């Protein structure tokens, strides 16, 4: 069968309409998202522009604050304490080293729309999906990994007949990128949903899974001796995010009918991907921005005073 190219805009359309409806339903609680831009990275600038444009479309208030990187931490702390601010996003890279990871945890969990602070990262890797015992407050998931999950749901890769949390059972996935912001969290999310995930980067291949018969409560990680050339023919889904223009997946290694998803700013698949793939998603950016706003509305709702229980 011919390959179908699925654009991020078609996946995002449903979420955009849902966001508009939610914001319109509570005009008295229109949330404010503050973005901090402390670099001149063109992709960060573009992401900030996308954020502002889509917030206007959905009715969310957005304020972009350009700050010197040496004053960024102080600015985040001030926004954490400001009750008028409901969500915070920082456009990385800032220092492009471990200090960026430190800044991710400076953002309050109450306002962390990116889901990158320690609390949310810990819960994600340990397959803890709710913030409370009553299971009324879902954890915040990093925007791009969550966007890719929603793309895979849209494509029908998730088996909705299976119980929630096990719906990737039987699927083998390759994620070519193991960054702490996207690749590694994505591998964990997919493995926690039941998939066998091969996580690939320049240091080699790791396998993320919940064990035989998805018997473990959360995923485990095992170093593999196989190369990317060995594992690609095994995969039902191949997801790429290599931030290098020259990197291309070898199409000849892919399984016929593979689902191919690219989240890199560059195209990691060659044009001949359409000769092998059944479904091809060239980018996920518009879905990522929807997930950012979705996280914001969730956090804003958590911040509102809860009605007292009736006597």
Image (cartoon, grey):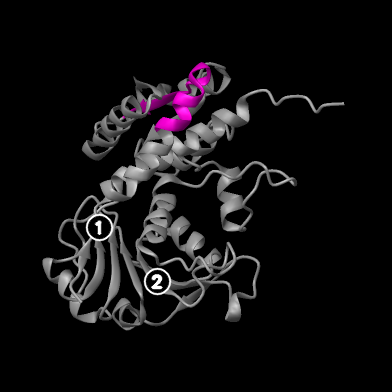
User: Dot 1, how many residues are within 10 Å of its Cα: few (below 14), some (14-19), or many (20+)?
Assistant: some
Dot 2 corresponds to which residue? 173
Say left or right for 102 vs 258. Answer: right
The residue at 18%/70% (across/down) is: 273
**Is 5 left, or right, of 162 in this rendering?**
left
**Picture quadrant where residue 262 is located:** bottom left
Structural crowding at the residue carrying mark 2, measured as other residues with C-alpha within 10 Å and reported as few (<14), some (14–19) or many (≥20) = many
Residue with the most extreme right position: 311
Question: SS at mark 2?
Answer: strand
Residue 220 placed where, x, y %?
57, 70
Q: Nearer the viewer, residue 94 or 248?
A: 248
Tell me the distance, in whole angstroms, between the alpha carbons under discs 2 and 1.
18 Å
Side of 87 relative to 202 (left or right): right
Circles 2 and 1: CB atoms closer than 8 Å: no
Q: Position of residue 141 (x, y in %)?
A: 51, 47
- Report the span colored magenta: 20-38
Which residue shows up at 52% across the image and 20% down it?
A: 29
State the quadrant of the C terminus.
Answer: top right
Q: Is residue 245 magenta?
A: no
Report which quarter residue 58 is drawn in.
Answer: top left
125 and 202: which is toward the camera = 125
Residue 259 is situated, as x and y percent measured from the top left of the image, at 30, 69
Q: Is residue 26 within the magenta segment?
A: yes
Q: Which residue is mark 1?
A: 6
Q: Residue placed at 57% from the left, 17% from the top?
A: 83
Residue 75 showing in the rendered view: yes
- Comparing 245 with 88, the one in front is 88
């Amino acid at each position: 069968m011919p390959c179908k190219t699925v654009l991020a805009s078609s996946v995002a359309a449903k979420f955009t309409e849902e966001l508009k409806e939610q914001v319109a339903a509570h005009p008295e609680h229109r949330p404010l998202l503050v973005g901090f831009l402390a670099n001149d990275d063109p992709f960060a600038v573009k992401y900030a522009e996308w954020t502002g444009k889509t917030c206007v479309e959905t009715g969310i208030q957005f304020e972009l604050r350009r700050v010197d990187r040496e004053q960024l931490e102080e600015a985040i702390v001030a926004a954490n304490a400001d009750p008028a601010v409901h969500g915070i996003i920082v456009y990385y890279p800032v220092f492009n080293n471990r200090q960026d990871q430190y800044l991710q945890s400076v953002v309050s969990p109450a306002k962390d729309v990116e889901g990158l602070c320690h609390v949310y990262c810990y819960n994600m890797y340990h397959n803890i999906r709710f913030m409370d015992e009553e299971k009324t407050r879902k954890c915040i998931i990093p925007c791009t990994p969550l966007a890719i999950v929603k793309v895979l749901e849209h494509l029908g890769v998730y088996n909705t007949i299976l119980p929630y949390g096990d719906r990737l059972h039987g699927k083998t996935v390759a994620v070519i990128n193991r960054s702490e912001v996207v690749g590694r969290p994505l591998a964990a999310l997919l493995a926690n949903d039941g998939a066998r995930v091969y996580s690939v980067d320049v240091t080699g291949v790791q396998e993320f899974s919940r064990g035989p018969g998805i018997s473990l409560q959360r995923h485990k990680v095992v170093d593999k001796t196989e190369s990317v050339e060995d594992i690609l023919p095994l995969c039902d889904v191949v997801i790429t995010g290599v931030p290098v223009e020259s990197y291309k997946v070898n199409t000849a290694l892919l399984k016929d009918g593979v689902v191919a998803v690219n989240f890199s700013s560059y195209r990691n698949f060659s044009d001949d991907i359409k000769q092998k793939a059944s479904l091809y998603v060239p980018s996920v950016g518009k879905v990522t921005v929807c997930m950012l706003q979705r996280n914001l509305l969730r956090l804003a709702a958590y911040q509102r005073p809860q009605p007292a229980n009736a006597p």
